Amino acid sequence: MHIHQPAAGRTFPRAILCWLALVCLCTPPLSAQQSPPAASAFGSGPILQNRAVTILDGQWRFHAGDDLRWADPASNDSDWPVVNLSTPLVEQGIDSYSGWAWYRLKIQPQQIAQIGNPPSGQQLSLMVSGTSVGQIDVFVNGIEAGHTKGMTESPSEYQSPPFVVQFNPAGSGPTEIAIRTWAGPTVTINRGLLDKVQLGAVDDVAALHSMAIGHQWDEYVIADMVVAFMFICVAILGGFLYLAQRNHIEYLWLGLLCLSVAAGGAADSAFGLAIMPLGMYHVFTMFSGRIFMAITLEFVLHFTGTKSRRFIRGVQIGVVLVPFVYFVRLILVYQILSVASEVLFCGLVVVLLFRAWRAGRSEAGVMLLPFFLAATADSANTVLDFAASRHWLPDRFASHRFYFGPIEFGIGTVAYTVFLGSLIAVILYRFVRISQEEQRSAAEISAARSVQALLIPTQLPSNRNFMLESAYLPVNGVGGDFFQVLPLKDDSLLIVVGDVSGKGLQAAMNSSTLVGALRNELAHDPATVLNHLNHVLIGAVASPGTAVKELDCAPCFATCLCARVYPDGTITIANAGHLNPYRDGREIALSGSLPLGVIADVEYEQATFQLNRGDRLVFLSDGVVEATNSDGELFGFERTQQVSNESARYIAQTAQRFGQTDDITVVSLYLSSRTAQPSKEELAYSK
């Protein structure tokens, strides 16, 4: 019998160095060790604890089709062909068929007497074993004695475990055993649905049935349950790893991947124990296999850091939609698409892992070899299964089963185990490496924050001439904005506000370099100060230090505004590509120039103008202007001007609430010097 199941309904890796593992693990099949040679209808049969159970093999009458009258012992079956259960029907001249068929066997009283001397008064019973999903109904002398789970008024296809029925022989006449069999319309039956019928004392048959059920667990359940349990454990591990490193979503997809495999293993076990019918099993495994492929691709995308995802998204959608072709009864099209999607899936994963390995991700290389072997074997196995299902190749080329002691398993189980082991090793290696990198990065950022805290003033040198306030809000803990307010000997102030390109640690270290150079600057002329800082930044980029590896040869520039304010209100200011300052809510137009660090020979122009007593001068970074809300709207220059006459903290917090995307720096100066010229408001009040 051959069952036409959807090709590649579940996509599992089939083999990873499996031929090496199987040499060590595989033993001959249990049936080859324990089952006796085919016996005649009433031979001695298998010996079970010094008792005999007879195999009713030969002289069965067979007829395809269905008629409940054939259960009647008086029904004439003389024109039915005689078959043996141990030999495939097609080898006995019976054409393959689908649906219903009957087996009948007539036993004479003297033949029943040959059965192994059961204990006095103990009844006889039959153990009936079917093949795969064939459903069976047993009649003894025209009376129904028992049936499989799926043999109801509306039969359904379940896995058929061996079952026991009571055998009540006729008095003086022959006893008629009639067995009705059925399999669904998608099943092409070559061997026959009745595999074995054994007759013996109740206790003997019960013991034999217990062994058969144990063998069913060995064959259909144990390996799948073990694999499912292992994947559930890894799914839990993936969940814990994700909770520990929320920014690495690949651990979440790892957990979902393992859960999809575990769900497939649970479905295999449920089907093998005749809990789930074949139709439901097909639907479940079709979709679980496609979901497995889609989730695995998503995991590999995040694991390898692949940026180009449009084609992969198309493949994910396509493989999930493939099962719907089956439901419109395009079976052959579905099978072809299934094979093609599995081969494409395996190829994509191998390519993504290979490209990541070539790009320097060593963990991708560790996973590449086992997955490549698994994908190659799985794809070849799928193609062979499909060819066998279409009868293009003999059935012996389809999937084979192997044994480890009494436990039966397929190539996929070996592949699962090896691939899962490599997956665990790679993920744990990656987790430890990332943890170490994050600890090192956190230590570097902490050190940079400590340095920056020394270089960014927390208290400003306010005096009777000037009142200053500032706000500094880095976007990532440490930032590239910087400012300094340096009191000079003539009671003037040197104010420098700047913004280094980039964010985070690199920007913070470069800004610290500029602040250190500024504090060592002897000249206080704004244009001269900017020229000096320009040369310092160009030298720092050309000859980077080695303390922070990520900063080596990193391109960098900085905008900067330098102003010197005198007690009488005179201000000299030079601008290197920075935002213009605001005076009492109005922008001061300055001639711009190139930022620091672009070219070495650049001359910065400076301008001089007069502040009045009571004027407020505000310096700020582009983090205020470039703040962006959830709708993508910029804070912009208009809003900046509207709040520019407010306190530094109010300006910074307003931009932050709007939607901070960059470091925010605001420095505000209020001129209160008595030597400065009074403002127009003061003059008007005095009159």
Image (cartoon, grey):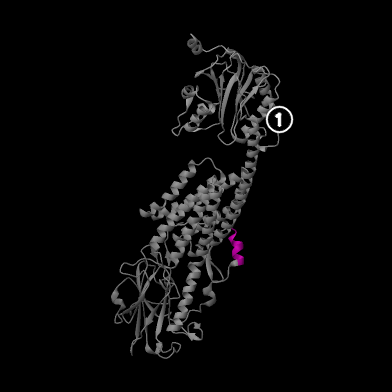
On screen, residue 593 versus residue 174, left or right, reads right
The image shows residue 44, relative to residue 668, as above or below, that is: below
Packing grade of label 1 (10 A; few <14, some 14-19, many >=20) is: few
Percent x, y for residue 22?
Answer: 59, 64
The image shows residue 37 at horizontal and vertical percentages of: 50, 79
Q: How many marks?
A: 1
- Give percent across and percent down for residue 613: 55, 15
In the depicted structure, whether residue 48 falls above or below residue 532: below
> Residue at position x 44%, y 47% from top?
318
Q: Nearer the viewer, residue 658 or 215?
A: 658
Relative image position of residue 52 (x, y in whole percent)? 47, 85
- Residue that carries the numbered disc 1 in the rendered image: 543
* Residue in the picture at 43% in, 54% down: 287
- In the visual, does 578 lie left or right of 6? right
The local secondary structure at tag 1 comes to: loop
488 and 126: which one is in front? Answer: 488
Q: Main secondary structure of the magenta part?
A: helix
